[in-house]
Image (cartoon, helix red, strand yellow):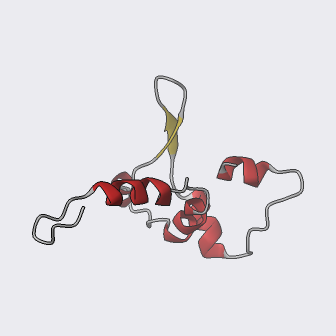
Amino acid sequence: MKSKDWRADPAGAQIPDSDALQADACGPGYGYDSNTRLLLEKKDDMRRRGAASPDQWDAVALTFAEPVADRLAHWSRRLVYPNLGVA
C-alpha cells in the first residue's frame, strides 16, 4: 500500500491531530514527470523558498518503504574479507 492510498482509504487514516505533522504533509510542492508520475518537491528547493523540511512526515512516509534487508543479507554473504580469509 502506498501512503497516498492509505490517506484516501474510506475507513480513514488515523493521522494524529498535530499542526506540525499536518504542515509537514502539506509543505512540499509537487509536479509530474514526462510519464505523468507524481514528483514531490526536493528539500533543497523547499529550503530555497523558505519552507521547513518535512521531517515528521518523512517518518510517516518511510513506513511505506519496501524492505531491503533480504537484499543486504544477500550482498553481505558475497563480500570477501582478504585480511581475514573469510568469504
Above-or-below relation of 84 to 72: below
Q: Nearer the viewer, residue 31 or 15?
A: 15
Total label count? 0
Q: Residue furthest left?
A: 83
| Residue 50 image point, x, y percent | 39, 62
* Percent position of residue 79, x then y: 25, 58
Question: Looking at the image, which residue sits at the far top?
Answer: 34
Residue at the (78%, 49%) spot, across then down? 8
Rendering coords of residue 70 (x, y %): 49, 56
Which residue does the image show at 12% across and 64% down from the upper left?
82
Quarter residue 15 falls in = bottom right
Give above or below for 22 relative to 18: above
* Residue found at the very far right of the displayed protein: 11
Side (left or right) of 44 relative to 1: left
The image quarter in which residue 43 lies: bottom left
User: Is 31 placed left or right of 4 in the picture?
Assistant: left
In the displayed structure, does residue 87 sit left or right of residue 16? left
Residue closest to the eye, 54 or 2 = 2
Above or below residue 33? Residue 60 is below
The residue shown at (55%, 53%) is 66
* Residue 53 location (% of width, % of height): 44, 66
Work out which quarter of the rendered image holds the C terminus and state it: bottom left
